Amino acid sequence: MRRRIMSGRRAAAALAAALSLAAVPAGGAVPALAGQAGEPGRASAVAPAALVTGQRDGSRQDSADAARRKLSTTLRARLEAETDRPTGFWIRLEDRADLSAASSVTGWADRGRYVYDALTSTAKASQAGVVKELRAAGARYERFWISNAILVTDGDLGLAERLAAVPAVERLHERVTAERIEPVERRAAVDALTGSSDEAVEWGVAAVNAPAVWDLGHTGEGITVSAVDSGADLRHPALASHYRGAREDGTFSHDHNWFDAAGSCAGEPCDTYGHGTHVTGTMVGDDGAENHTGVAPGARWIAANGCRSCADADLLASGQWILAPTRADGRQPDPAMRPHVVNNSWGSQLEGDINGFFADEVAAWEAAGIFAVWAAGNAGRFGCATASSPGANAPAFSVGATTADGEIAVYSSRGPGENGLTKPNVAAPGQDVRSAVPGGGYEAYSGTSMAAPHVAGAVALLWSAVPSLIGDVAATRDLLHASAADHPDDECGGVAGNNNVYGEGDLDVLALVQAAGQEERGHLAGTVAGADGEALDGATVTVADRGTTVHDVVLGAATRTTITHSSSQEIAPGNSAACVEAATQVLRTFTLDDFGIAGDFAVTNVSFGVEVADAGAEVTVNLYTLDGALLYENLELLGSAQATLEAQELTLVDVPVTGVAPAGSTLVVEVAVQDGPFFFVGSNAEPETAPTYIASEPCGHTEPVEVAGTGYPGMHAVIDVTGEAETEVPWLDGRPPAFTPRPGRGGAHPGGPGADRGEELPADGVLRVR
């Protein structure tokens, strides 16, 4: 769920007048005593506040005007003009997977799987309502998970407006045009460089000091590079042996190594255009004889031909495949097989065009540890501010082109880029770059498309030399910046060492590797076990560096886990109660002993259900410890966070919030809203292992009371708490067999929930409401 996390906490507004609690008819409408004069479901400013159910009629849905505003102006104009033929358009969903923790996941395979699972699960859940509408309309569509979007290929205005009314939809817009960043010049029939056949390298490879890194023993071994381009000629002598799918017996496996997005090749990598072969040759090309075109000849390559057409759908499909390559038949996506580096010599060819269409793709790659390189563009002859998206976007690492004289090429696009940031990031050789072309030959091309693969190859050399940097995109970016040779130019602004012509300066691979250092940096992880084999918490490990430096590292035995009192995560419509548009707090208590948590519980996130929420509803999540009866005076605040919600129904929202509940304590989680937008916490009537509590001063409940006591016995709020604990409590297995019936007394009540109500507790420990 995309949301804005706010700092601080807004105090609840107190009402002096005594306010009454009202029952609600089965239909869910506000009773007459609420005295509303306007919209159904809302109490007037002068009426007594009442606790009512969250079910509401069609008048509470997004208005037609709000739905219409989700259509871009361009798309609406096209749909209105093209009434006699189907029109393609994009549907963007609101939800975004939270990938913030991806960089902390150790292991290349595990990190890729974490990102893939987060993206695919978010897309599957949030696209369900839209897919239902599309199927009902008989429309043709294609779903994408890397950006949580759906492409409709045969839509009309009526369908677009119906889809815009789906709450999960963020916006609808026209299809996007991207193009290869074409070479400004091509020269054919170029011979290999003169000199010793086993030493001669192309001028660009020499200019970036790649051979000096080879002399250190690093040529890119263990690293896989890739390109989203026009494809690659598998049979080219400079490329064939470097293909990751090449077998020792001379045959090839294309599973997880080749993606034919355009459907233009006969079962193996091909390139009917030439651009992708040239780019791949600059990254890794070497025929073992006299043609040494690649910066990292020891690396392996894979490819996707998403820019054979450069259609928006082909580019997104290729972006997905890069993150999770599939078998040749499109099955079995495997994030562990993703490349380390991906080159992109394509983008918008409108000079200075900044858009965010591929922003999700770039973010997903980075979260998975893939370093993406972008050509800056060839519009420099039009002056400054000619860099375009995606290369001009803030997260993208873009490359300008230089000549053999070391000067910027006239065509190399200049910055600034998005939000005034310096672009390009660095400059690299791009003029008269000789590399492979389909058919086994070589040609010299000129353009920033030729400069970018020099940087892609440089990253491959760096990660081969310093494996601890693999996947550390931020650190690699910093090293590329820091090691580049300053090249002053004030033509388009900036400073000597960081300007909008050369960026941070000229690429120097030797300086890059030297800046990283030959000694690897890394992390220490593991478990210290006692004599009984059980993990020890707080063990100190002494790490010595050649006997000169000693570091003490404390290793904990904490396990990330989620606890809940809910037997179901489903959110039921019309099941919850709240004081309408007035301050309402829903609380749950979690006595750590009940969950077998013997030590501290360090909370990291709280998830809560949303039955319905208006756009702009501000929800505060508070963490407390409880000492005594469940009264506010007995609560001590541990942590707090706010989330501003967008309009939604029947969803789960996850909010990062931190606080440490001490061992043996009772943790209280409060989901609170103040006066303002419509909001009802999500709940269901399935069994729960502890009561749900509610408080609302405007509705006469100044202290928390069990919801069952207010006339809503079936409102069992879905609130889950995730954190680090010394004892693993598997997800949704974290429901205690018995719970402390009156919070704050400490210890699990032997009779469980039934003992407090004179009921018999079932054998599985879950109280079933009768």
Image (cartoon, helix red, strand yellow):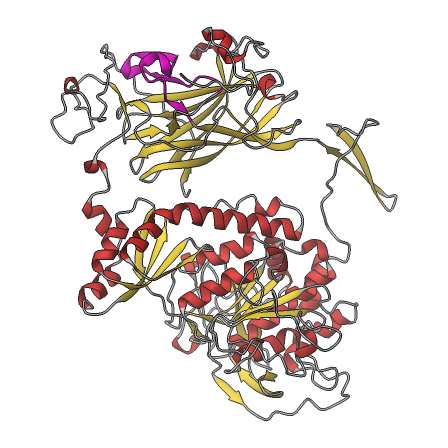
Marks counted in the figure total 0
- Report the quarter where the C terminus lies: top left
- Is 750 placed above or below 289 here? above
Q: Which residues are magenta?
A: 689-717
Quadrant of residue 288 within the rendered picture: bottom right
Quadrant of residue 726 within the rendered picture: top right
Q: Is residue 532 magenta?
A: no
For residue 615, side relative to residue 108 (left or right): left
Residue 87 percent location from the top left of the image: 27, 66
Q: Please report the residue visible at 56 percent of the width from the left and 18 percent of the height from the top.
A: 763
Residue 602 percent location from the top left of the image: 59, 27
Depth order, front residue of 103/611: 611
Residue 548 percent location from the top left of the image: 86, 43
Q: Please report the residue visible at 25 percent of the width from the left and 56 percent of the height from the top.
A: 160
Residue 488 visible within the image: no
Residue 37 percent location from the top left of the image: 11, 26
- Report the quarter where the N terminus lies: top left
Q: Is residue 716 magenta?
A: yes
Residue 128 visible within the image: yes
Depth order, front residue of 42/419: 42
Which residue extends farthest left? Answer: 37
For residue 279, side relative to residue 184 (left or right): right
- Is 460 placed above or below 629 here? below
Which residue extends farthest right? Answer: 547
- Is 690 placed above or below 618 here? above
Quadrant of residue 322 within the rendered picture: bottom right
